[in-house]
Image (cartoon, rainbow, N blue to C red):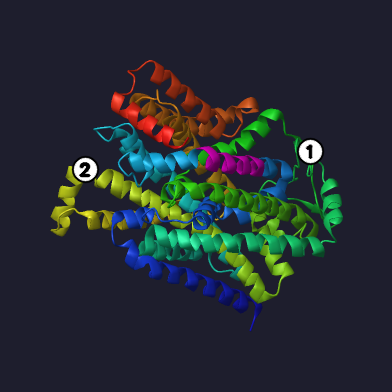
Amino acid sequence: MSDKLQIFTAMTIYMLIVIGIGFYFSKRANKSSEDYFLGGRSLGPWVAAMSAEASDMSGWLLMGLPGLAYWCGIADAAWTAIGLAVGTYINWLIVAKRLRRYSAVSGNAITIPEFFSNRYHEKKNIIMTLSALFILIFFTVYAASCFVTCGKLFNTLFHFPYHAMLIAGALFVVIYTFLGGFLAESASDFMQAIVMITALSIILVCGTISAGGIEAVIENAKAIPGYLSLNSIASPITSIDGVQQVKDGAPLFGEAGKYGFLTILSTASWGLGYFGVPQVLLRFMAIRKTNELKKSRRIATVWVIISLFAAVSIGVMGRVLLPTETSLLTNSGAENIFINLSHYLLPAFLAGIVMAGILAATISSSDSYLLIASSAVAKNIYEKSPRAKKLYFRLTGKDADDKSVMNISRITLLLIAVIGIIIAWDEQSVIFDIVSFAWSGFGATFGPIMLFSLFWKRTTYPAAVSGMIAGAAMVFLWKLKIAALGGAFAIYELLPAFLFSSLVIVTVSLFTKKPSEEICNEFEQVRTSQE
């Protein structure tokens, strides 16, 4: 059996297992919309923790982050990893328990938009609709990054056409998310978290041994200006078309670039995104018992630290083993380092199993993105709109009921997948860049309002709406306009957008009428029940 066929066989077996999980949970998922979207709040601590982190990390953990470290050294990748590790721990420590209880107390909310709406007892569903629309926008971008990963993976491995693999990957995710809903997603994400961390560990250990040990890896990195520093960054010398130049069998680097305190702060601010990403927050809402969250926090934190360390280290180690590999000599191509190393280091069938880790990372995230975005439309826009229900009746001849909510969700899921494919159509798309924008969108749009909603009783409804809009608008404004000014303005858009949203929430809350006694009593009920 040829090497490529062995790799393909191993990956196919893995994909069949994932589809089997979808079929297994399909009967239970279709009982009600709560079962389909939140699994009936039945997740145990291991599944909650591992599925939360697997759904969060996506293909960028095995492709984007190692590629970043391979291309320009550890500064960008390491500070991103540090921010994410700290953000993971704090999110599980302070947000998880209160959100689990608050979402149950405030009308048994099963989506993030529904929680915000119930938290402020809104009557016109403004915050619910806005939340759903922002989730739809940013998760469509997120899904696109996952489809890019699928396209690059199969194109690099088997030289299959990028666009065909892009579509095939999207269809695969759509099918099993369509079938099994949240429980299928969470169960498969648990398995995929194990596959991901195993794959990273195998490549790191085998690669380090093949490279001559840890000392050899470090010495090679030290020889590249700024590569192994946390306060400077390596600068590959590239041609006009972005290809790194090679001379005498060695890749060329220029003088190390500066990586100052402000850049470090903005890069580490990736950790702020955790307070606003729905795929993690939903796991907090879905866990069966609040007293199991401490165990989940420990599991999640350990998994994240090991995985991020391994991903960054693989990029550094790859510079020893494959310094001039043609397919790695561009910023976008560098994201294939994990794939190339798997092929280089391991027997074909085992390489296929390891590279299933990339599929695991991709699937575990894209299913979450599609399900949450489609549920936002179905539960928080369609279900709350009399006009939409009337239209559904005219088109189908059936009354709008709980079943229709799931049908609308599945239609929306298909539409999101199509738009995600369109966004991902460019073969030169850089996974890390796509993910970073969507991450900042969620972090700034939902992070501040989530924290203020859970921990500041004085937060008002107008402040919640204003803060959400301000955070989202600043992400686009900073990314598209302000960052182009360069200098101190060329920082990651999440940090200024998060701070601006927080400032708007505090200011508007202090200048608007205090929340009603009913809302305040509900807040106190949740607060005191945790002490």
- Which badge, 2 or 1, is on the more N-terminal residue? 1
Q: Secondary structure at mark 1?
A: loop
Q: Is residue 37 magenta?
A: no
Residue 279: mark: none
Q: Where does the image place residue 36, in percent across and percent down from the top left?
A: 34, 57
Q: Which residues are magenta?
A: 80-94
Q: Residue furthest bottom?
A: 1
Residue at the spot 28% in from the left edge and 32% down from the top edge: 122
Residue 517 visible somewhere in the drawing = yes
Closest to the camera, between mark 2 and mark 1, is 2
Q: In the rendered view, does 86 fall on the left or right side of 326?
A: left
Q: Is residue 81 magenta?
A: yes
Q: Quadrant of residue 40?
A: bottom left
What whole-number distance in Å separates the C-alpha atoms at marks 2 and 1? 56 Å
For label 1, count other residues whose C-alpha is less than 10 Å away and answer few (under 14), some (14-19) or many (20+).
some
Q: Nearer the viewer, residue 200 or 437?
A: 200
Q: Where does the image place residue 497, in percent across and percent down from the top left?
A: 51, 30
* SS assignment for the magenta stretch, majority: helix
Total marks drawn? 2
Q: Which residue is mark 1?
A: 256
467 in relation to 112, above or below? above
Q: Secondary structure at mark 2?
A: loop
Which amino acid, mark 2? Ser
Q: Which residue is mark 2?
A: 385
Q: Nearer the viewer, residue 342 or 514?
A: 514
Residue 331 visible somewhere in the drawing = no
